[in-house]
Image (cartoon, rainbow, N blue to C red):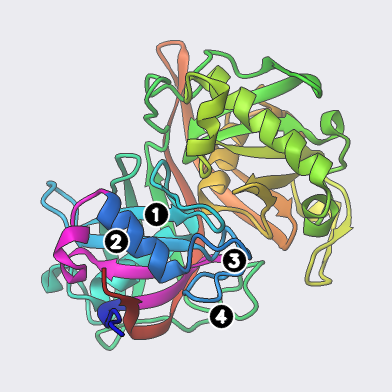
Amino acid sequence: MSHAAQIRIPATYLRGGTSKGVFFRLQDLPEAAQVPGAARDALLMRVIGSPDPYGKQIDGMGGATSSTSKTVIVSSSTRPDHDVDYLFGQVAIDKAFVDWSGNCGNLSAAVGPFAIAGGLVDPARVPRDGIATVRIWQANIGKTIVAHVPMTEGQVQETGDFELDGVTFPAAEVQLEFMDPAAEEEGAGGAMFPTGNLVDDLEVPGVGTLKATLINAGIPTIFVEASAVGYTGTELQDAINSDDRALTMFETIRAHGALRMGLIQSLDQIATRQHTPKVAFVAKPADYVASSGKHVKAGDIDLLVRAMSMGKLHHAMMGTAAVAIGTAAAIPGTLVNLAAGGGERQSVRFGHPSGSLRVGAEAARVDGGWTVTKAIMSRSARVLMEGWVRVPAG
């Protein structure tokens, strides 16, 4: 009886922020997977263990959540003033689908460390001790990310005392700058507010007419008020992920928001965009107990935010959504800004299911519209395993 031998591919399994993913150097992939297309998608799905009708990804590297079903491809960049190109693939769990439509802000923190360790950054640009500045071209959305990676004795420093809610153990801090974060989405004309409004009336059948801030920054995001959809903003995962009615409601909001933003041309196309746009709901500060048991005090945060990712409430906050939150908070009049108390601000600390997070953004009015030069936040990253992944040939 004939059988397919397994092939092995150099890979590294990394945590970046509150996500985990399998990282590859482009040059290490099989030749057919070095270019976009069906061969690449098939390989990455097999690595992660998708599609899995059981929803567990037992026969792969995925962790059966949107935060752990992720892949990254990194290569040396030929672009001026950039060190590496970074491509992110969000692998669906139970469907044969890889979504290339957006970035992962959390895994962005691991790109610089991976690139340095993998020899993809010019050694002359990497200090023996201090901070290495890695200029990353985010190929999914065509944006620049600048990662500040700590170095000690010629090696990436991974351990430290920086604590990130949603990650159990402390690690070394990696500061990220998302430059000009307004996403250039097809159909949205590259506009930060694709409808031209800071707040829209979004009609959602079966839900009603919702006030919504539709923004392209970091990742296309639909912000609604928690109270308008029956929540307080203090919810943890089980309150929503165990409620099929709630999940259907949020997916309906996502579909109609995507249509309004020009990201899709018909509602049935939303099935091809599982990763984007995101849906988040906001509320004014309130005391709550995070999923770790930590007490979050209203006086320690500016607002509450809960966000949906790949059809489920996220256990913490996606990095790209954090960029959208920071950007929207910096612009007076958005729902995010109003929930945080209104007015001009350069940073915001928001409460999420695992705790809180601070993100900054520099916003200014230009020619009657808003522009954001960069959003800033800190994450951490750590290598969990390195070596080879194995997949059946073919």
Q: Are marks 2 and 3 in contact (CB under 8 Å)?
A: no
Between marks 1 and 3 in the image, the one whose residue lies nearer the viewer: 3
Tell me: 313 left or right of 159: right
Q: Residue at x 53, y 14 (%)?
A: 195
Kind of residue indicated by mark 1: Gly
Q: In this picture, which residue range is highlighted in magenta?
A: 12-37
Disc 2 target residue: 73
Q: Hey, what amino acid is under mark 4?
A: Asp
User: Magenta stretch: residue 157 in it?
Assistant: no
Does residue 148 appear in this view?
no
Q: Is residue 113 above or below residue 355?
A: below
- Does dot 2 land on a helix, a strand or a loop? strand
Q: Considering depth in this image, is 178 or 256 the residue closer to the camera?
A: 256
Residue 394 place in picture, x, y as percent: 26, 68
Mark before the other along the chain sequence, 1 or 2 = 2
- Mark nearer the N terminus (4 vs 1): 1
The CA distance from mark 1 to mark 2 is: 8 Å
Residue 89 is tagged as: 1
Which circle marks residue 64 in the picture? 3
Q: Nearer the viewer, mark 4 or mark 3?
A: 3
Give the residue displayed 43% in from the left and 43% down from the top. 102
Give the mark nearest the N terminus, 2 or 3: 3
x then y, percent, for residue 41: 34, 55
Label 3: few (<14), some (14–19) or many (≥20) C-alpha neighbours in 10 Å: many
Q: Secondary structure at mark 3?
A: loop
Q: Callout 4: 10 Å neighbours few (<14), some, many (20+)?
A: few
Q: Nearer the viewer, mark 2 or mark 4?
A: 2
4 vs 1, front mark: 1
Circles 1 and 2, Cβ within 8 Å, touching? The answer is yes
Mark seen at residue 161: 4
| Residue 110 appears in the rendering | yes
Q: Residue at x 50, y 64 (%)?
A: 379
